[in-house]
Image (tube, grey):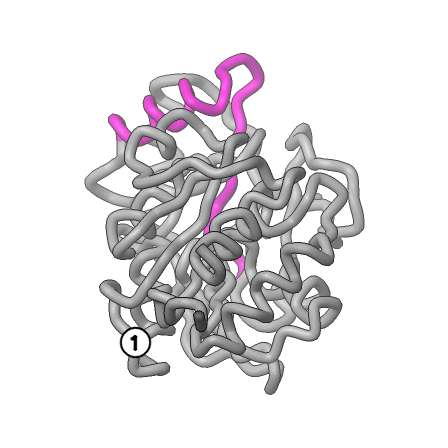
Amino acid sequence: MSPAPFPYKLVATDLDGTLLRDDDTVSERTRDALAAATAAGAAHIIVTGRAVPWTRHILDDLGYHGLAVCGQGAQVYHAGEHRLLTSVTLDRQLAGLALSKIEAEVGPLLLAASRDGLDGDVLIGEGYRVLEGPLPYVPMKDPADLWAAPLNKVYIQHPTLDDDELATIARTMVGSLVDVVMAGAGVVEILPLGLSKATGLSLAARRLGLRASDTIAFGDMPNDIPMFGWAAHGVAMANAHDELKAVAHEITASNEHDGIAVVLEHLLHG
């Protein structure tokens, strides 16, 4: 008996904590499962909070030539052509106002920012805690440098508040001006209002002639909630944030234990 046809035309995967293991690699099992899904007719789109400069090397290592949604939906990137197809920038005046309002409530913030473009720098302000690793960044010597060029996002941290507390307060204070998302440990972001992974994924899918009803999505953090709301089926990793698990259709194994492959193999082979 031949296997049932693969039920989705689009597989959308987050990157950190989802497709990537904790050592920033993708297992052979997960690579094989994604290759089998694409051989069965599905497209694969990576949807990440990382901007293109922090994503490109991973896509190249994977031999990934399709579309990727980067920068929390701000950028649609053609990996095979190394070309930025669309990019949305943050209104810097509005972002400055939002930061002022948040700081009036919680005191001084620690700041970083992602500049727009294929080679946009990530600026890191004094005191901002950066995860050690290979991702390049530029120390911000003058606070005015934050606003010197177009931005995709501003990162905020607080000396004492944890990520969930900071994101909740910021959303309450400035949610009518900008979007605030929690994308990972130590990663709370200020984005253009209305921008999300869902908006970027819908643009990328439309370029492929695909729809939300064609899509299965995998993720691990609250910034994946809009993508789950858009897709027909949302799968949270075992290591996912409780807010994402609460809206997921299904919970799979962790990123360390091939959670994407577990689901795809079941769909491919029953």
* Residue 150 is at least partly visible in this image: no
Q: Quadrant of residue 114?
A: bottom right
Q: Quadrant of residue 198?
A: bottom left
- Asked if residue 152 is positioned above or below residue 162 in the image, the reply reads below
Label 1, secondary structure: give it. Answer: loop
Provide residue 6's location: percent of width, then percent of height: 39, 68
- Outermost residue, left direction? 176
* Residues packed near mark 1 inside 10 Å, few (<14), some (14 to 19) or many (20 plus): some
Q: Is residue 28 left or right of residue 229?
A: right
Q: Is residue 109 left or right of residue 22?
A: left
Compare residues 160 and 126 and report the one nearer the observer.
160
- The residue under the point 36% across, 39% down is 250
* Residue 84 is at least partly visible in this image: yes
Provide residue 266's location: percent of width, then percent of height: 47, 52
- Asked if residue 76 is positioned above or below residue 238 in the image, the reply reads below
The kind of residue on which mark 1 rests is Leu
- Asked if residue 40 is positioned above or below residue 34 in the image, the reply reads below
- Outermost residue, top direction? 160
Q: Where does the magenta region start and end?
A: 147-173
Image quarter of the C terminus: bottom left
Q: Is residue 253 left or right of residue 5?
A: right
- Outermost residue, front direction? 1
Query: Pointer 1: what residue?
Result: 210
- The residue under the point 51% across, 62% down is 46
Q: Is residue 171 magenta?
A: yes
Provide residue 9's location: percent of width, then percent of height: 36, 72
- The residue under the point 43% across, 57% down is 267
Provide residue 257's location: percent of width, then percent of height: 64, 39
Q: Is residue 111 magenta?
A: no
- The residue under the point 44% across, 70% down is 1
